[in-house]
Image (cartoon, rainbow, N blue to C red):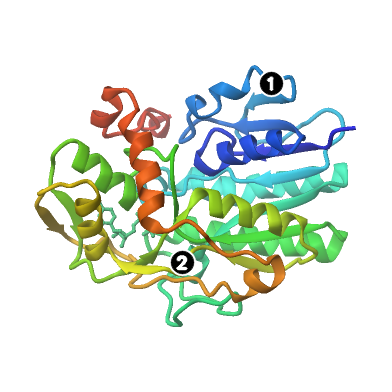
Amino acid sequence: MKKTVLITGAAGFLGSHLCDRFLADGYKVIGMDNLITGDLRNIDHLFKSADFEFYQHDISKFVHIPGDLDIILHFASPSSPIDYLKIPIQTLKVGSLGTHHLLGLAKDKKAKILIASTSEVYGDPLIHPQPETYNGNVDPIGPRGVYDEAKRFQEAITMAYHRVHGLEVRIARIFNTYGPRMRLNDGRVLPAFIGQALRNEALTVFGDGSQTRSFCYVSDTIEGIVRLLNADFTGPVNIGNPDEISILDFATEIKQLMNSQLEIEFLPLPKGDPKQRKPDISLAQKLLNWEPIVERKQGIDHTLSYFKHLPKENLYQKEHSFNQYIKK
Ligand code: UDP
């Protein structure tokens, strides 16, 4: 008998890669997404599989799944700063009400649940690199608070379900990750720079570009998540690549990799933008025998070739269609 896994955010960047992985590993996969930031094109190729089903549903409303369920992977949420700034209430609802519904479902089905948390729970960190034991420096009412606090609440309610109901839970604190199927217009730095370079525009560096990030290629992220799911560990685990780079150096690296002479345009630093971010992955190394293996240059190369093969109109589609949704 095949095991069944429910993947929320299935049409999104990480969710769609998880669908691929679990189908390849012999699971029945039920994908769920409300398609606000997700895109069916990311999972179009899966509908021919008899082991794949898809529900278009907003998990901040009651979730019903008929039959048995062994695993829930909760990856539904806007995750790019411009997305969650545009749809802050939906971001808070999916992290809180949505997570509550999935925990209830997991309890009902006696399923194991892994939730996608984030390095944003560390806010603008005062400790560097960030270990899981660091409690963070989040501004609850700042612009990023809607995402950060939703994810912190998500961790809290997940642990409460574990403590009160004995639910088997896993918490992945995912740091900046990138790769094919990101939206070119989602505002995050890597698709932003690649989109700008492909359109022959200046690369927009926010602030003086001295802020740092550490980018993990998607195949490494997915491998870390799968290993965490299968490990016997309840608390949060950082999944990310400790190879840290400043955003200005990152812009220069993209220019070099794309052989481009483009200008760099300096724009104001958004409020609350963390100054530095780098995961301490010693727990994941020890517990999961995992660490990233894809070098940034190689990962950018794969991602670039994905973006180059997208239909031309994607290059010029600057806004995502969920604007319409916000007005409702
Ligand atoms: N950033 C930038 N130019 C852009 C988009 C982002 O300089 O066009 C910066 C942003 O200010 C942040 C970093 O790149 O310091 C990473 O931003 P991203 O939105 O990818 O994710 P974050 O790690 O901030 O959630």
Q: Is mark 2 within 8 Å of ligand 1?
A: no
Q: Residue furthest top?
A: 48
| Quadrant location, ligand no. 1 | bottom left
Q: Is mark 1 within 8 Å of ligand 1?
A: no
Give the CA separation, mark 2 to mark 1: 43 Å
> Does 205 sit left or right of 90 as displayed?
left
Q: Which residue is mark 1?
A: 49
Residue density around tag 2, few if under 14, some if 14–19, many if 20 or more, within 10 Å: some
Q: Please state the horizontal and vertical placement of residue 195, each as a whole percent of the image.
A: 25, 40
Vertical order, 270 against 91 (above or below): below
- Residue depicted at 34% across the width and 27% down the height: 310
Amino acid on which disc 2 is placed: Pro
- Residue depicted at 80% across the width and 62% down the height: 162
Q: Please state the horizontal and vertical placement of residue 129, each as a whole percent of the image.
A: 47, 78
Residue density around tag 1, few if under 14, some if 14–19, many if 20 or more, within 10 Å: few
Q: Quadrant of residue 210?
A: bottom left
- Residue depicted at 83% across the width and 46% down the height: 111
Q: Which residue is mark 2?
A: 140
Q: Please state the horizontal and vertical placement of residue 263, each as a whole percent of the image.
A: 9, 52
